[in-house]
Amino acid sequence: MTKVVALAGGVGGAKLVYGLAKILPKEDLTVIVNTGDDFVHFGLNISPDLDTVMYNLAEISNEQTGWGRLNETWNCFEELEKMKSDNWFRLGDRDLATHLERTKLLNSGLNLSEATTVLCKKLGVETVIKPMSDETIQTIVTTQEYGDLPFQEYFVKHHFEPRYISHRFFGIYSAKINADTRKIIHDADIVIICPSNPWLSILPILAVEDMKQLISSKVCVAVSPIVGNRALKGPAAKMFHEMNIKPSAFEVAKIYQGMIDGFVLDNLNSSECDLIRACGIIPMLTDTILKDKYSKERLAKEVFDFASQLKKGN
């Protein structure tokens, strides 16, 4: 069978991962997830993107928000509010259990890959999920108003309103790929880059030592997170504007140029196909909006079939 590795951030990436998990045998799919958003809050190790992917695959995610748990309660959060605590990051009671368990596992001596495997088993997730590295990597966003902000403060505390200037990945130069993850990528036939923010979700993964080189040796297809001229989730389109770049699928494809063979973009971006071809990338048009389980599975199958065709052509 065809072995697939998917690279994913949070909400948008998790939606396509859900579809891939539905159409592929569990032993043929591995998801490598961004951990540049990870941080410690109230002494707890929180991995927002890992949690979003896990919750989606366990079918216990909040479909309305795209993050957090289904049927969440907020007793702890409400008590913290009464205490006027610094609780800008909303932690629901069910979500809190995940962070407590992860912190316990890490404190017992497990690395993040091992702790994630344990959490997946506890949540009934059979798909292999791997963090991009077991080392701590922190995405820092430099803003006009506040200077340097850890990603979650930029994204959640300040609702990505501050003007973006630049970003960097603190700790990236000492980060390594987990040995198991390295072998999984080496053995993969296809790599799929999910429709996540290219700068803040995918580039942190690719910046880990040897990751880009390993993936570049595979047939690789990326899915655009831009539909028309906007991002369906998160700050991607706003960041384009603040870099004086017109938001487009073509601009996303350029970020991955030299690494991807194919690029999936929405029908609304059909006028950009020739520009993408000129970059040496084969475009594929389809409806990329993931609004329900059917659309997630449909797009996953189309992306997988597209990548498989490209592999046959190599």
Image (cartoon, rainbow, N blue to C red):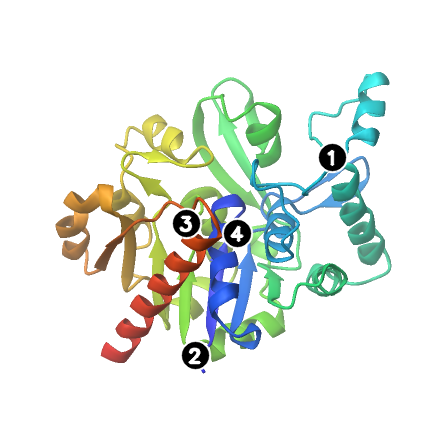
Residue 58 vertical position relative to residue 151 in the rendered view, above or below: below
Pointer 2 or 3: first along the chain = 2
User: Dot 2 lies on which element?
Assistant: loop
Labels in figure, total = 4
Circle 4 — which element? helix
Q: Quadrant of the C terminus?
A: bottom left
Other residues around mark 1 within 10 Å, as few (<14) / some (14–19) / many (≥20): many
**Which badge, 2 or 1, comes first in the chain's sequence?**
2
Q: Residues within 10 Å of mark 3 (few under 14, many from 20)?
A: many
Which disc is residue 195 wearing? 3
Residue projecting furthest to the bottom: 1
Q: Is residue 238 above or below residue 269?
A: above
Q: Where is mark 2, residue-wise?
A: 2
Instruction: Residue type at mark 3: give it.
Output: Pro
Badge 2 crowding class, 10 Å Cα cut-off, few under 14, some 14 to 19, many 20 or more, is: some
Q: Tell which circle, 1 or 4, labels the residue nearer the N-terminal end.
A: 4
For the residues marked 2 and 4, what is the alpha-carbon distance in whole angstroms?
A: 21 Å
Tell me the SS state at disc 1: loop
Residue ID for mark 1: 91
Q: CA distance from mark 1 to mark 4?
A: 19 Å
- Residue nearest the viewer, comparing 52 with 44: 52
Which residue sits at x=25%, y=32%?
246
Q: Which mark is residue 16?
A: none
